Image (spheres, coloured by chain):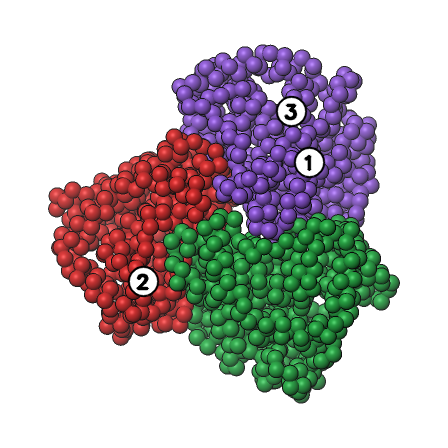
Chain colours: A green, B purple, C red
Amino acid sequence: MAPLERPAWRYFSSDPAQRRVAQDLYETVADLPLICPHGHVDPRLFADPDYTFGSPTELLLIPDHYIFRMLYSQGISLEELGIPRSDGGPTETDHRKIWQIFADHIHLFWGTPTGVWLQDELHDVFGVTEKLTGANAQEIYDHIDVKLRSPEFNPRRMYERFNIEVLCTTDAATDTLTHHKAIQASGWQATIRPTFRPDAVVNVDMAGWGQAIDQLSAVSGVDVRDYRSYIRALEERRAFFRDMGATATDHAAFTAYTEILSPTEADAIFQRARKGEASADDARRFTGHMLTEMARMSIEDGLVMQMHVGSFRNHIPDLFARFGRDMGADIPISSEFTRNLKPLLDHYGTNRDLTLVLFNLDETTYGRELAPLAGVYPSLILGPPWWFFDSLNGIRRFFDLVMETAGIYNTAGFNDDTRAYPSIPARHDLWRRAASDWVASLVTRALVDEEDARQMVRALSYDLAKKTYKL
Amino acid sequence: MAPLERPAWRYFSSDPAQRRVAQDLYETVADLPLICPHGHVDPRLFADPDYTFGSPTELLLIPDHYIFRMLYSQGISLEELGIPRSDGGPTETDHRKIWQIFADHIHLFWGTPTGVWLQDELHDVFGVTEKLTGANAQEIYDHIDVKLRSPEFNPRRMYERFNIEVLCTTDAATDTLTHHKAIQASGWQATIRPTFRPDAVVNVDMAGWGQAIDQLSAVSGVDVRDYRSYIRALEERRAFFRDMGATATDHAAFTAYTEILSPTEADAIFQRARKGEASADDARRFTGHMLTEMARMSIEDGLVMQMHVGSFRNHIPDLFARFGRDMGADIPISSEFTRNLKPLLDHYGTNRDLTLVLFNLDETTYGRELAPLAGVYPSLILGPPWWFFDSLNGIRRFFDLVMETAGIYNTAGFNDDTRAYPSIPARHDLWRRAASDWVASLVTRALVDEEDARQMVRALSYDLAKKTYKL
Amino acid sequence: MAPLERPAWRYFSSDPAQRRVAQDLYETVADLPLICPHGHVDPRLFADPDYTFGSPTELLLIPDHYIFRMLYSQGISLEELGIPRSDGGPTETDHRKIWQIFADHIHLFWGTPTGVWLQDELHDVFGVTEKLTGANAQEIYDHIDVKLRSPEFNPRRMYERFNIEVLCTTDAATDTLTHHKAIQASGWQATIRPTFRPDAVVNVDMAGWGQAIDQLSAVSGVDVRDYRSYIRALEERRAFFRDMGATATDHAAFTAYTEILSPTEADAIFQRARKGEASADDARRFTGHMLTEMARMSIEDGLVMQMHVGSFRNHIPDLFARFGRDMGADIPISSEFTRNLKPLLDHYGTNRDLTLVLFNLDETTYGRELAPLAGVYPSLILGPPWWFFDSLNGIRRFFDLVMETAGIYNTAGFNDDTRAYPSIPARHDLWRRAASDWVASLVTRALVDEEDARQMVRALSYDLAKKTYKL
């Protein structure tokens, strides 16, 4: 069996001078606590002190659409991979068999971030010392399985071992935050904060918007019957989230389009949507308007505003019908910010009480629009590379395209944005290594000296995330 | 005279560690046979066992629009370069003079793929050991001229010496494949396969579409009078091509736009086109519909489907009027796939019997759209960088942008896509070197180990092309 | 205090082999005179032989929107930075205090071109040997202040010391070129040429177009009352600029859109604009038409034509209202050339008497559109990376994306495009270093040999700019 080799210099440039500096810089930040300001870990993990993860397949494969979309692309069905069907129909239940399929196709992940994270995770979190192959798949399954049954692999113990300082979840606007309440009531010494994500009540073209509005009425105590009460209900929910510890909101939109509707126009669209009669254009304009409204509210209540734009969700109708959302079939589109954000920025962009963190999936916007925007607007901050671009090359391109124009202090440091809880340390470690390597390339070319370089690496690894998200 | 230096480590990174690994990897694939699944070599070369190439200028300059467009960009007319005029008017006939012009301007090609291929070709195929300059131009002309008169420089002997395992040509849907028949009848032990390219009968806005339809009637034996008979005739031609050894089709379209027309709508456009009354929008919709139809046929007959999109052909009307197509004046446009391909993918994208290989000239789509699409759809495979991007930098960007998201197993390996027959080995060699260097950069950063790296390089150099194209 | 370290190998790759070649190449061009064919230095500097620069803050900070937009992005107001208000209202007048704010925020510029240029400028022009920090800010201020009072820091002496061979300014079409006349009359042996920039009289949607037309009448002696007299006046002004030594024109447009209006259509728009009734579409079409007209005039009078497209000017209305233009709030948009330029190119693109130099702020066009266009059209030449992309990474991307397709001989070498006079040597030096490093990377991979490499570096550093601009 081939050993799983993880040299100390891994992921750094192979140029000896750059590698040496990178490693020195990395060592100054490797052990800093993890700041996790944006992600999708289920708060349930921490609410129940005795939560357990189930089988290795249940923990590592079934919830990870990065993994199963790649297997699917090679002709393996999601049923064979045990992904639960929306209709409850039969799917593979033999977790060892699923694990074996994955191991037999491990070559699909060579050179991918998924491959890299998994390798680090297996080694560092589960103590696996051999490279996973079809041949040793069952042995490694056994090894992980034993670990998962031990009390050390309780999510709370892992949180402590991972050295997480703060972790923010992402929660629907209508969420009652029961799990967050349970965590707070339990007396456990950890900081798990909710994040206000109102997409389901804002995007009138999302399936279930009507029910979401009913729920909004129910949880807010505001009878949502028109645009005015709708806004009041949202403000109430934001206040509730803030009371529960939230410091940020998050907004997913197809594009960065913004505008300002008059209350009358906004109400007209709201009423049409209530009757199920909103057009595609209504949806686009209402979302654009609500993004601007959310900026206004952020200035008032101090919540940091995040925007994630540019994903064409559920691109494969068949997968959506049979398995639901988040099946790895979300495909990026090109994005535009210079003109789309202008209405919002005209009103709130120069307000120093607003922090608006931008994410998108079109790297061409990095140098062309985002860095110039963040390099002048006091409110704008650039989030780290998102999704497919949270990778060694993606991070390098981000640094190369953004930092010359915006500097590092108009960026938000790192967030792991993950559902895959045990991959959190691997993701932060990859970022810290990539940041160290990039800063090292400035040092070896005499662009910055080592003293400044150490401050840069620390900012990118820790300070900027904490400051941007007011943590 | 300066020697033409071709060190063993050429084109690899100058970092010693990466170079060492790259060279080791390269040596494992350098001598593998060449798989040429897509290109534009004229089958006539192989049909006539005694075919000869003419002068060095006739072989290397006049047919190569990469070369003469660059000379043209610096103010040299195509007449001076001996390019045949559509009206048969006079152009330069002194091939030595044309060769001299080229050699006097060799600096235009410094650092370009054309320059690199040519250098390798002159050295490896023709045994030239000096750097081509204005001063030694005539000497080198003589040297090549002598070679070209020898029996070793017969296309069949070169095919064998080049170690080509299979070579696919690109042929009009109405082609009777006479040359392919002659090759098969000759008993020569080589695999030359046709490829079905129906652009001239599909794109109703192409000059000569009407005549092409008449020809389609003639060669298919189907009286093409409406959309239904048109489809039948196309199916007949595909069957004929398959019988003649074709494993693939190829489709050039301005954009990746697809849709599904009803038979009635399709017929209405067909009839308008027959009367010369089709609008630009008709052409766009009909092509989009036919791409989807071709996907359906591919599922039925098993032919691999290729799409080349995003070239604005014949951008200079004056050159087109005087010299015709393929004069180096085709300019890329930006492309979009996420929305354009959706109608086709909604119908056929998850069908495992479809292989759809995508090519385009907008590198921004690599990471943003193509890799995410290929990384989930079972039918989608990404072709190697096309045209201007079949270059050292183009290949590196392709790897860097695609592989983290799609892995290497959702790509099609290499194809040379060339009309320039003697440049085939140089082009494959450049790809193999670039692939080895890129994989080496993964090894030296501990992203993959050397064992996996060897499999990756072999897949990229040989296996993937063979598998994708069912060769 | 940390020394300001400026090793001889700065900005080169850290790979020892590449660095060695880069440094050797750089040494062959480091001392060549500077060719400055495009920039925004005020000719007043040279007209008055006793011109002095004022305080360090007046020279280095207040006029540099690269610097103050970055400070503004971090919440510092432009008033605090002493930027003059349009209404003459109060702003900070204590230049030492402003300098201190800048030094306290020097970390914002780590790794940015502004940071790099400033470091080089402080060291090479002002003899500063310590790294600027908050702690030594006042000391360094004193040091520069003393220098600025000495006769050596007169602009003419600096011009000579900077080894400038020719410097072109950018001047409104209605400018009487008083300062250029004064320079020529003074007998000073230096070449300061004007450049004809007619934006204010061409873009009918620019504030003040009407007055600009009145001015045009006044200075040209042509009574501009219709499209025909307007064209005559422009031709007269071009002739005047040519007589005054101009070799080029410059045109800023929002997009690269071109078309050809009939004289009747052009006149109709002109008349609507005169009445203040031109629509946005009128403005777009008129600019597109005038670009084509300017190409025609360039063919007639031999002036090189420059186009700068793709900047959304004055993106922050509040800054524009309070401080005017050029406040660092100009944001790029995506650009398109393949279709937009076609009308102009259809008429004039293959004319060898036209030189059209293209600049834009969307790097995706480099490889996709610009290099293929410049690689075939005899008239097209690519300008160096502009604005945010005049940086180490920007230059490397430009070379990597353009040169494989267009070669270096379809590019225009370097121009510094700066208002910041004392930064000129630093900017040229950075380009020469970046060019040397890029060419070195071709040498170390055996793509070109050292003999050719030396010619390439010289062309990029000196010859191409001189030849393109006919200097």
Residues at discs 2 and 3 both on one chain = no
Q: Is residue A51 visible?
A: yes
At 48% from the left and 70% from the top, the residue drawn is A463
- When asked about the image quadrant of residue C61, the answer is bottom left
Residues at discs 2 and 1 both on one chain = no
Residue type beneath disc 2: Ala
Compared to residue B236, the image places residue C306 above or below, namely below
At 32% from the left and 40% from the top, the residue drawn is C27
Count the labels in the image.
Answer: 3
Q: Earlier in the sequence, mark 1 or mark 3?
A: 3
Relative horizontal placement of residue C70, taking residue B258 as reference (left or right): left
Quadrant of the image containing the N terminus of chain B? top left
Where's residue C241, x and y in %? 25, 43
Q: Is mark 1 on a helix, strand or loop?
A: helix
Relative horizontal placement of residue C34, taking residue B311 as reference (left or right): left
Residue type beneath disc 3: Phe
In the rendering, which numbered label is found on residue C2? Answer: 2
Q: Is mark 3 on a helix, strand or loop?
A: loop
At 73% from the left and 40% from the top, the residue drawn is B468
The foreground one among B412 and C85 is: B412
The foreground one among A138 and C216 is: A138
Q: Mark 3 points at which residue?
A: B162
Q: As drawn, which residue projects farthest toward the right?
A: A90
At 74% from the left and 57% from the top, the residue drawn is A68
